[in-house]
Image (spheres, helix red, strand yellow):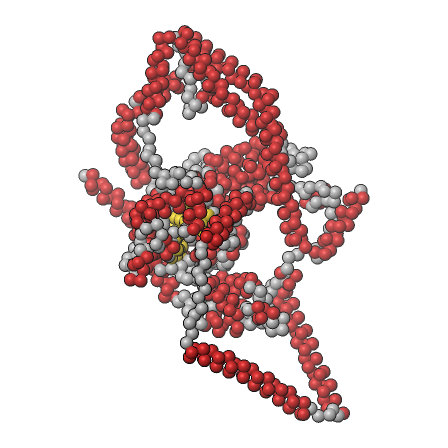
Amino acid sequence: METDHALKAELTLAVANLGLVSAPWDLSLVRDTFSIRGGKNMSQRTYNQLWADAQLELSCLLEEELPAEPPRPEKDRVVFFQRLAMLFVRYTQIFRQLEKAYDLVVHPQKRRFIHSALESVMGRVLELKNEMVEKEFSEYHYMDDVLHDLKLIPADLEIPIPRYFHSERSKEVQQRKAMLTDILKMAEVTETPEPVMAKKMSQEEAVKIIQVAERARQGRERAKFNMKNLNMNTMYRIKEPGAESAESAAVCIQKVWKGYVQRKRTKIAREEEMILLGMNMDPKYEEPRPAEMTAQAIAASTRVKQMEHEEAYQKATVDVMNQLRDVEGDDMSKSMKVQIQQWFTECRNATGTFPDYPDEEDGGSALIFAEKTPQQLLEEFAAKEEEEANAKAKGKEEKKEKGKSDKRKEDEEVEEAGLKMLPSAFLLDLEVESKIYADFWHNRSEYGNFNQMHDPELIKEEKRKVIEAEIRVKVDEQMRHELAEWKLSVDKDKGGKTKANAKKKKGSKSGKKKKKEKDLTADRTLQSLCRELVEQGLLKQTRNVQLQDFLGDYSYLGTTLRQHDIEPMPSLSDVRQVISLYAVLPLGSQVVHEKAPLIKSVLLVGPTGVGKKMLVHAVCHETGACLFDLSPLNTAGKYPGKSGLAMMLHMVFKVARLMQPSVIWIEDAEKMFYRKIPKEEKELDPKRLKKDLPKFLKLIKGEDRVLIIGTTRDPHSAEIKSLCKMFSKILLIPRPDYGSRRILWKQLIRKHGGEGTEALDLSSLAKISDGYTPGHMVQVIQSVLTKHRVFQQAKRPLTAAEFIAPLAQIDPVFQEEEEALKSWYAKTPLGKKRSKAASGKEEEEPAKDKNTKKKGKK
């Protein structure tokens, strides 16, 4: 009771400090949300409920996507895209909920299940994004109408970066950074410093320097003398104060003071009015409140508890596996041997011969333990042998049948035209996980498990299968020898035939082998390869930049503009979302990268200063990826000749696969595909990677988390066909719009030590800076906010006028340049499809193709 009263008093005091309305507290709920003195742990009810809500919404979505009868094709492209957009937004909400639940749930076994569901949802989001691109012929989509229908805000559409991408690989990333820093230090030590040579100076230059210094000294002395004269003059002008002068001085002081007080009151009243109208934010909300700080502290302690519970779970799994081996291992092996021997005798009694033992590739004795009779197993083995024998003969017939089936499919497509959903690699996984949740986790009672520790019984059920698989392999080896002895003793005549057949099978399996790539560095270690790449400047350290630092506002008029046949420019928020979908999520998860639509290369196109290089470093930081630099200017003069070029690419891609995830960056990618090489760059040979790099790009497979990112500011100088073949995704990064510029000015000024006051008119500054990129803004802010100016802010607040003069000295990105990039993008494959779709020609071309095919057949 004493603890209850103390807890109630603490909570009422906390509520009073936060400015909330006090209410009668239910201590059972309080204990579930706050930690109590004495070291009691915080309840996980909130995060379990979040997980339950996500699973409920996921089950509803699966019912819509996997109906009993397949839906009919949709003929209206707009209606079909609205359905895709709705699914995308709803899956994104589930993704956000599961990511938050996985980040803060403490139970180790729950976290493993949430992790698998989270990866499946991530993959489904990427599949829907790919389908929207194919149906709308655009990399950027505007779903403000969908957000309005679902009553969501633009922040709800933000793609979250799962925290475990970086946290679960923090040790590996730190070791990699330490290795790179050590290699860089060794390279700096080995390099001999160039001797510092004093520059020779002529007599005239020396005289000029002395004259400048002397004139400056004389100017300073003259200024001091003038100041002294001014002070003396003011002293002589002051008269002795009389009665009238004292009264007038008092009136003057009263006048100034009353004016100051009234202006201050008016200013406070105006601020209160703006806060009341919702035009300005209350200052108490700008600083972190105690509740927010408490929530952050609780989240940090929860993550510490996660690590403790994970360590306990790992120790428990080792103990349980050892216990199962010691206690149940002998019984498992004996029961397996008895079952296999019984199967031998049953097959002998049923068919008169001993069976062939299943191969390890087919599952070994696991096939025997399936609920099948010996006759059924023998029939399966005989059917497999017949299929292998008749595979070659059926090959030609299958080709003919395929040709006929293709004709039938074409006829069906002609009859039933429309848009259908593409097959998914994640829906079946999601359905299985949803059933497991409904059957096992949904109604599971956790009474007494307040600390959310692991369940030993679940570990036993899971690891018993692993132990059975280990023991089965050993038992299979023993029983194969025993079966061979039985055959030799009982079926001597048939034993040779079975061996011959087995040899034939082995020979047929090992008949075709794919050619493996030659490893040019088979005798070298990974560390030596990394050291060479670092010394050559091809493997670089990444900057500590997050994707959230790429600031930008949401595009609020995208749907409206497209309804009026106006193609809008994407906002910086749209760019951030696409980068997270195309680069961060696939590189961060192996399962997602293998099953989701494979993206091998991305090209970022935009003017100077829009943040292309920043995005490359942000992708590397968020996923813990290595950064390789294959820019034409960086590779110039390194590894000369064809053999040297092959060695360089082999080393880069080999290390990239071994240290995946990896990003291969190509700055100024247009130089690699020049139409005509400028004279000043002919010696650098920028096109040396043009032929060989696409060959290595084809070798990237789903299991290789390697992404090539190119950046360019002048795509017009490149051959557009070869550039588009190299990069499967081309993203246009525009100048920031008004909303993005206002956010950029506010955040960048605050980042560099500036304070936003009423004197700083951010709205006018954002309007004036139309055409300037974030790089230009950073340059201007750095020139204005010096250390001296930052210290003066208390006396002299910042104003927008201070930024105009340095801003005027920089050339902006003009509208013509942006229109030129838009016209270039319209010539890319996706741009052509978009322009055809806008003109209504996308439906005419398929019909023409079908007619031409029919004419050719006649």
Residue for point 35% across, 50% down: 639
Residue for point 55% across, 72% down: 799
Left-right relation of 377 to 227: left
Judged from this view, the residue extending furthest toward the top is 490
Residue placed most toward the observer, 38 or 553: 38
**Residue 843, position as x, y percentages in the image:** 31, 48
Residue placed most toward the observer, 353 or 693: 693
Residue for point 62% across, 89% down: 229
Above/below status of 658 relative to 836: above
**Is residue 579 among what the camera can see?**
no
Judged from this view, the residue extending furthest toward the right is 2
**Is residue 508 among what the camera can see?**
yes
Above/below status of 614 relative to 214: above
Left-right relation of 188 to 37: left
**Residue 781, position as x, y percentages in the image:** 51, 67
**Residue 582, position as x, y percentages in the image:** 44, 48
**Residue 655, position as x, y percentages in the image:** 42, 43
Residue for point 62% across, 30% down: 456
Q: Quadrant of the N terminus?
A: top right
